[in-house]
Image (cartoon, helix red, strand yellow):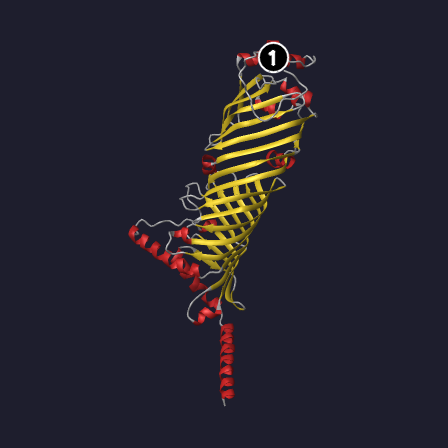
């Protein structure tokens, strides 16, 4: 008798479950798309278009929505600013029996997000704020939304973004920032409602990015494990490729303030200078490798925000670097003050065309400090000459500030010194009487095809002011 009762109960639940799933299968969820789109517009203000199907999955139990577009209803001519190939939500079955929703995972596939800053400094996704709405009511609504959003976060186990692509552009700037093929998996998501906003959110995540580019500068093959805690996202082991050179570093993103602050540290080994010159200057005029360190922090925003808040330093050092199309030793003694900076530094003299120079040492250490790049230790040496550069660059106004290039003697004093002023696009030489006298003498020797020589050491000022005291050594086979 007991066995019959138990068998009857089992069969009842089995038929009930089968009937439930058969009922679910015959329901056409696509009939609810207009209602769903209307609810989303009323609650968020954004216009959602579901062009694909809404389907139910049974293992795991969940819903999938395909081909979604989101647009700003106040700027329909611009089209959608976000597109998704699919949006999947999977639920846990056991909590449903207790009328509790626990999300197993959320997956967003092929997100294409386009963020554009307009000429009026507003963004394409921003909704206009009605002036007739009571500000107190808005605060109350926002507070209510925060409370509603806080609870579901506790019940989400995993969030995944697959093949996400993001483009940011500023109509006032010609360059764009883009992220290509980002895959992000967030786990161990927790939310402490007693803390303020992002301070209460914590998670662990793994992310990979095929390419991250701003203008001509790009990082590729990015991978990192990150942790978010107390509104700070951090990773101590970030791998990436810069100018075809695999590198390692760390990153910290502080979200506690009004603007996100990013701090970067990286050690560079064997940087391929040929690829660097190709990507930045579109020409491979330098070959060899360099190593160094980068430490930068800045606030995230547009180009002006980055330039005005960047702080830190960049240092690169290389040995036996080949410089193509330039004969540094000949140019060092043939600097003609009547020539423009572009002719001197960027275009080889006819007498040096097709030649090259082996740089024994080259060092570039610059300090970045809120709108300026200061030349801390910038110098190079060949088998015969040593040159150094001082001054700074105002990267906001794009101006050169007291930039000086000097040909050095063994003590680091300037044999010949040239001042450069102006802007990045229109630099100019500043010529004084001593510069004219010194450079005219060496230029005469060069252009008269006489044997190159230096001033008599006895004529030099033994108590001269040291121009350069950095790490680049003077050529051993040349006395000054």
Residue at point 45%, 69% (across, down)? 95
Q: Nearer the viewer, residue 182 or 72?
A: 182
Q: Secondary structure at mark 1?
A: helix
Q: Quadrant of the C terminus?
A: top right
Q: Nearer the viewer, residue 325 or 385?
A: 385
Q: Image check: 17 left or right of 411?
A: left
One can see residue 134 in this view: no
Residue 424 pos. (x, y %): 52, 28
Residue 317 pos. (x, y %): 60, 32
Residue at point 50%, 48% (across, down)? 114
- The residue pinned by badge 1 equals 440
Name the quadrant containing residue 476.
top right
Residue furthest bottom as drawn? 1
Marks counted in the figure total 1
Above-or-below relation of 305 to 181: above
Above-or-below relation of 55 to 226: below
Name the quadrant containing residue 299.
top left
Above-or-below relation of 163 to 93: above
One can see residue 391 in this view: yes
């Amino acid at each position: 008798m007991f066995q019959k009762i138990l068998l009857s109960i089992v069969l009842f639940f089995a038929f009930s479950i089968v009937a439930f799933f058969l009922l679910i299968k015959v329901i056409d969820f696509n009939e609810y798309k207009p209602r769903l789109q209307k609810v989303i517009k009323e609650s968020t203000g954004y216009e959602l278009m579901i062009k694909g199907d809404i389907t139910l999955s049974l293992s795991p139990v969940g819903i999938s929505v395909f081909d979604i577009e989101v647009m700003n209803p106040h700027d329909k001519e611009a089209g959608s600013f976000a597109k998704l190939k699919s949006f999947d939500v999977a639920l846990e079955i056991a909590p449903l029996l207790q009328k509790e929703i626990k999300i197993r995972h959320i997956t967003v596939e092929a997100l294409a997000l386009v963020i554009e800053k307009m000429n009026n400094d507003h963004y394409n996704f921003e909704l206009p704020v009605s002036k007739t709405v009571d500000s107190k009511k808005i605060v109350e609504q926002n507070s209510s939304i925060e409370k509603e959003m806080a609870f579901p976060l506790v019940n989400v186990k995993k969030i995944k973004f697959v093949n996400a692509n993001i483009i940011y552009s500023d109509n006032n700037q010609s360059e764009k920032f883009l992220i290509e093929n980002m895959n992000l998996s967030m786990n161990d998501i927790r939310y402490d409602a007693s803390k303020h906003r992002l301070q209460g959110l914590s998670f662990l995540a793994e992310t990979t990015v095929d390419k991250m580019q701003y203008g001509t500068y790009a990082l590729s093959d990015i991978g990192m494990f990150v942790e978010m805690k107390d509104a700070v996202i951090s990773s101590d082991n970030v791998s990436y490729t810069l100018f075809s050179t695999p590198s390692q570093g760390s990153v910290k993103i502080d979200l506690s303030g009004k603007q996100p602050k990013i701090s970067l540290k990286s050690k560079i080994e064997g940087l391929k200078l040929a690829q660097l010159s190709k990507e930045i200057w579109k020409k491979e005029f330098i070959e060899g490798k360099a190593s160094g360190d980068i430490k930068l922090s800045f606030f995230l925003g547009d180009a002006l925000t980055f330039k005005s808040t960047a702080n830190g330093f960049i240092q690169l050092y290389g040995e036996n670097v080949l410089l193509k199309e330039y004969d540094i030793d000949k140019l060092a003694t043939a600097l003609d003050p009547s020539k423009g900076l572009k002719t001197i530094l960027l275009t080889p003299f006819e007498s040096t065309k097709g030649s090259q120079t082996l740089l024994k040492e080259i060092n570039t250490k610059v300090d970045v400090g809120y709108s300026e790049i200061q030349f801390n230790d910038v110098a190079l040496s060949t088998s015969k000459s040593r040159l150094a550069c001082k001054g700074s660059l105002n990267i906001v106004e794009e101006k050169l500030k007291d930039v000086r290039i000097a040909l050095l003697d063994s003590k680091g004093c300037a044999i010949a010194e040239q001042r450069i002023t102006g802007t990045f696009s229109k630099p100019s030489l500043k010529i004084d009487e001593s510069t004219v006298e010194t450079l005219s003498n060496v230029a005469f020797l060069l252009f008269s095809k006489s044997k190159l020589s230096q001033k008599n050491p006895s004529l030099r000022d033994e108590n001269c002011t040291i121009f350069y005291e950095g790490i680049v050594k003077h050529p051993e086979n040349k006395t000054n």
